[in-house]
Image (spheres, rainbow, N blue to C red):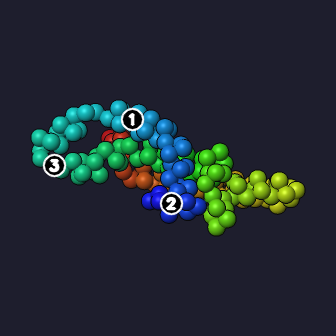
C-alpha cells in the first residue's frame, strides 16, 4: 500500500508537480537577488543581536521583493499553460483548463477549445497585471529608501 496514494488525482499533487516542474527558475532568480545584497546587513544584524527572521522580514525580503513577485508571476502563468507533466496526473474530478483544451480539440470542438484558450490567456494576463500592480505598490512602499532625497 502506497501512503502517497491519497494524493493521486488531487489538486495538491498537481500544484506540487507544477512547482517542481518549474522549480529551477525560482532559485536562480532568488540567488541572483540575494547576491545583489550587501552581506554586511547580516553581520550588522548579528552584531546587534537582531533575530534572523526579523532581519529577513524587515531587510532581506523588502529588498528582494521584486524578484519574489516575478517568480510568483512566472510560476502562475506557466502553471496555467502547462500540459506536459500534469496530463499524466489529473483525474476526472480535477480537470485542468489546459488539458480540457486538448480534450475538446481531440473531440472536434475547435470553437470551445479556442474559447477556453482565450479564457486561459485572459486569466493569465489578469493575474500578471494584478501581480504587476501589487509589485509596483509594494516596491514603492518597501523600497522608498532607494529614492533620492530632494534637497
Residue 11's mark?
none
105 relative position to 144: left or right: right
Which residue lies under the disc numbered 2? Answer: 5
Q: Does dot 3 land on a helix, a strand or a loop?
A: loop
Of mark 1 and mark 3, the one earlier in the sequence is: 1
- What is the spatial separation of the Cα atoms under label 1 and label 3, in whole angstroms? 23 Å
Quarter occupied by residue 146: top left
Q: Is residue 32 above or below residue 95?
A: above
Instruction: Using the numbered discs, state the Cα–Cα distance from disc 3 to disc 2 in whole angstroms.
Output: 44 Å
One can see residue 85 in this view: yes
Q: Residues within 10 Å of mark 1 (few under 14, many from 20)?
A: few
Who's the residue at 35% across and 36% down the image? Answer: 34
Identify the residue shown where x is 12% and y is 47%: 49
- Can residue 136 be seen here? The reply is no
Query: Residue 2's spot in the image, x, y percent?
Result: 47, 57
Mark positioned earlier in the residue sequence (3 or 2): 2
User: Given the current orientation, which residue lies at the most extreme bottom position?
Assistant: 93
Residue 23 picture location, percent across and down: 49, 42
Q: Which residue is mark 1?
A: 31
Locate residue 135, reporting x and y percent. 48, 51
Asked if the residue at tag 2 contacts the one at tag 1, i.e. Cβ–Cβ closer than 8 Å, the answer is: no
- Residue labelled with disc 3: 50
Label 2: element kind: helix
Quadrant of the frame with the C terminus: top left
Pinpoint residue 44: horizontal percent, then vertical percent: 17, 39
Amino acid at each position: 500500500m502506497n501512503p502517497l496514494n491519497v494524493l493521486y488525482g488531487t489538486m495538491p499533487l498537481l500544484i506540487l508537480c507544477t512547482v517542481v516542474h518549474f522549480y529551477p527558475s525560482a532559485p536562480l532568480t532568488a540567488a541572483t537577488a540575494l547576491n545583489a545584497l550587501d552581506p554586511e546587513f547580516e553581520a550588522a544584524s548579528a552584531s546587534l543581536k537582531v533575530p534572523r527572521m526579523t532581519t529577513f522580514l524587515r531587510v532581506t525580503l523588502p529588498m528582494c521583493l521584486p524578484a519574489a513577485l516575478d517568480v510568483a508571476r512566472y510560476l502562475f502563468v506557466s502553471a496555467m499553460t502547462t500540459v506536459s507533466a500534469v496530463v499524466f496526473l489529473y483525474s476526472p474530478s480535477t480537470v485542468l483548463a489546459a488539458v480540457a483544451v486538448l480534450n475538446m480539440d481531440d473531440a472536434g470542438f475547435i470553437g470551445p477549445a479556442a474559447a477556453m484558450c482565450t479564457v486561459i490567456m485572459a486569466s493569465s494576463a489578469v493575474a500578471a497585471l494584478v501581480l504587476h500592480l501589487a509589485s509596483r505598490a509594494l516596491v514603492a512602499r518597501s523600497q522608498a529608501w532607494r529614492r533620492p532625497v530632494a534637497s
